[in-house]
Image (cartoon, helix red, strand yellow):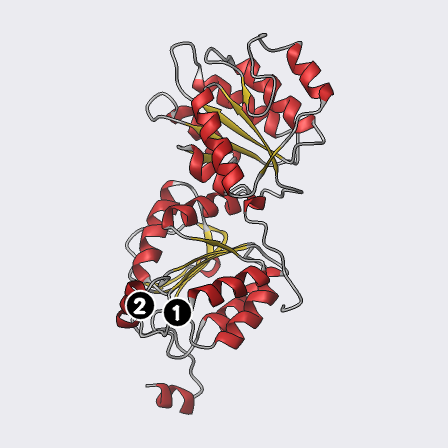
Amino acid sequence: MKAGAKKHGIRFIGPNCLGIQRLAIGLNATFSQGATLSGDLALVSQSGAICTAMLDWAETNGIGFSSVISTGASADLDFGEILDYLAYDTQTRGILLYIEGIRDARRFMSALCATFRFKPAVMVKVGRHEAGSKAVQSHTGALVGSDAVFDALVRRAGVVRVNTILQLFASARALSTHIKPTGNRLAIVTNGGGPGVMATDLAVDLGVRMAELSPATIETLNGMLPPSWSQANPLDIIGDATAERYRVAVDACLRDDNVDGVLAMLTPQAMTRPTEAAQAVVEVAKTSSKPVLTCWMGEAQVHAGRRLFKQAGIPYFTTPEPAVEVFPSSQPFTRTSAC
């Protein structure tokens, strides 16, 4: 097949792949059953199953794609050439990658370095252990080398590597909102001390700096919050927090020069008005260019609030972990001279 394609100047995707989609021209050359929303994220995956799961999740969450490319066994077109295309594609603003193995490592790294100069990229790379490597070879036939070497190379390229599909989903939600941080100092506003501590622990684990509120911000909050608030970051604004209390706390953090982004968290309690609090956060977020992430924990009582975040293009999560993990500077990779 390769010889015949080369003889006639034909390039092909696969074999053993889902196919390709190019939403802007209405092309759906896949056997994916659901509808794919048009957007500005590109999804490139060696696994067709990962593609279908991602597309089904994305449709429900209102996230769209510019291109969906399932590479399969990559007998001809491989990641390097696909990334070269996406780097200069004006309809693509962010790239999600699911990788099992690389056939042409030199071209892949060259394309990865070039792509990241223009666009953010997040990847899942599997086959990190021997058992997984054997499964990869039986699936796509790709050879899997040292994971430590691969990890060092992608870190040099500046690409964020995550380990789970849930993290890839969370990254898709964050990239789709085009948040643009200028640093990694995070402020957390919460009406529950426990979730705030959980988020803080994870932030420290990931290298995210907990912002130190300025004296002026503390003074402002002291005049507007109950005396029992935490007086520090994370900002525990107490379980009976009203929508106005959320508005005041998030706004004060966004105005603080020591803060690069805010995570607003809520747990539903008898005194809580989750939808009103969500509306207050949405309105404040519009006044600042700093990223605002949200975590409305629970389900039935907070569903309407999450819908408001979705409509406003604000990343929203159900638990603290993915909310902290997608804070864009939580993986402080930078390019080196290797790229």
Residue that appears at 52% across and 47% down: 175
Pointers 1 and 2 in contact (CB under 8 A)? Answer: yes
Q: What amino acid is at disc 1?
A: Gly
Q: Position of residue 122 (x, y in %)?
A: 49, 54
Q: Which mark is residue 101?
A: 1
Up-down: is 160 above or below 298?
below
Residue that appears at 70% across and 27% down: 256
Judged from the image, the secondary structure of the residue bearing numbered disc 2 is: helix
Up-down: is 106 above or below 266?
below
Q: Residues within 10 Å of mark 2 (few under 14, many from 20)?
A: some
The reply to whether residue 26 is visible in this rendering is yes
Where, by quadrant of the figure, is residue 20 drawn? bottom left
Q: Which mark is residue 28?
A: none
Q: Which mark is residue 136?
A: 2
Where, by quadrant of the figure, is residue 320 drawn? top left
Residue that appears at 70% across and 14% down: 219
Q: Position of residue 53 (x, y in %)?
A: 32, 51
The reply to whether residue 21 is visible in this rendering is no
Residue 214 vs residue 306, the one in the foreground: 214
Residue that appears at 38% across and 71% down: 144
Relative placement, left or right, of 158 versus 37 is right
Residue 173 vs residue 268, the one in the foreground: 268
